[in-house]
Image (cartoon, grey):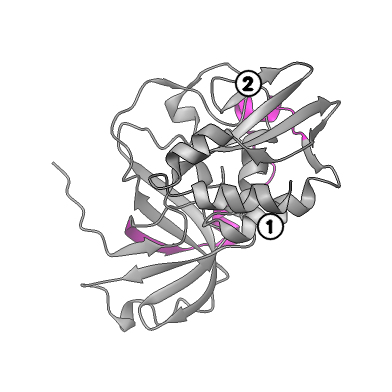
Amino acid sequence: MICYQPIGIFKCSNSKPYGAPRQGVLAQSAFGRVQLCSPITKDCVSDLSDFDRIWLIYDFHYNKSWKPKVQPPRGSSVKRSVLATRSPYRPNSIGMSCVKLEKIEELNLIVSQFDLLDETPILDVKPYISYADSFPNAKMGWIDEQNKYDIVFTDNTLPKIHWLNAQLNFDLPQTIQSQLEYAPTCRKSKRVKKYQDSYIFSIQAWRLPFKVKGNKVLITDLFSGYTKAEIDQLADTQWDVPLHIQFTELFR
């Protein structure tokens, strides 16, 4: 039996798996913090501040099970072998992310471009060394076969996206991109359903209709998934209903 003691905890505003980007480098706006703890001391990080990037080795604390084949968010309906993906549901729930080190404050590492969730246990921190860690011409197996789509918002949708993003505790545009830029209509790996001549993508109780045109995903609207009857019924019990009421009144 191998037992590891966490050396810290990751702190950020995102506590839900659906809000995390597929890879940390896709998240440009958020900041997180590695809160180091005993036995780590200042001497352990005294030479780390001059590195632009660091590796975070951590535990997928939401991991409860695993399967030999998984449905990756990046790809079609084809299942892939778990060891050929970065699925968090693995035989051993170990994750690794190369994040941007912004600064160090005492025993707190302030980072950006991450894909971790709040309260993620940190097992280790290592410096990113470009000559040893980067192989830009390496083949990427099944990932090389995937078509990437550009995400485009209509003019009437953008103000709604910007307003709602300011109210949420996760990056809404980034979540939309990470979910829809690959295989946007795959209903097995994301909350997408066909509706007339388009599709509807769901995030929490929010709905985003979109159309696929060539290599573009056109987001045509953003609206509440609650009906008026549901809002009246759930107003005192569902935490997000007041936000939906405010949104509906603002963009009616």
Q: Could one spot residue 200 in this view of the protein?
A: yes
Q: Is residue 231 left or right of residue 248?
A: left
Q: Amino acid at mark 2?
A: Lys
The residue sitting at 67% across, 39% down in the picture is: 223
Q: Is residue 198 above or below residue 167?
A: above
The residue identified by callout 2 is 193
Tell me which residue sits at (61%, 45%) in the image: 175
Q: Which residues are magenta?
A: 121-149
- Does the magenta run of residues contain 170? no
Residue 158 coordinates in the image, percent (x, y)? 78, 50
Residue 69 screen position, x and y as percent: 43, 19
Q: Quadrant of the N terminus?
A: top left
Which of the 4 quarters of the picture holds residue 125?
Answer: bottom left
Residue 230 x %, y %:
50, 34
Q: Residues within 10 Å of mark 2 (few under 14, many from 20)?
A: some
Quick one: 239 or 41, which is closer to the camera? 239
**Which residue type carries mark 1?**
Trp
Q: Which residue is mark 1?
A: 163
Mark 1, residues whose alpha carbon is within 10 Å: few (<14), some, or many (≥20)? few
**Is the residue 229 above or below the residue 46 in the image?**
above
Q: Is residue 103 above or below residue 29?
A: below
Q: Earlier in the sequence, mark 1 or mark 2?
A: 1
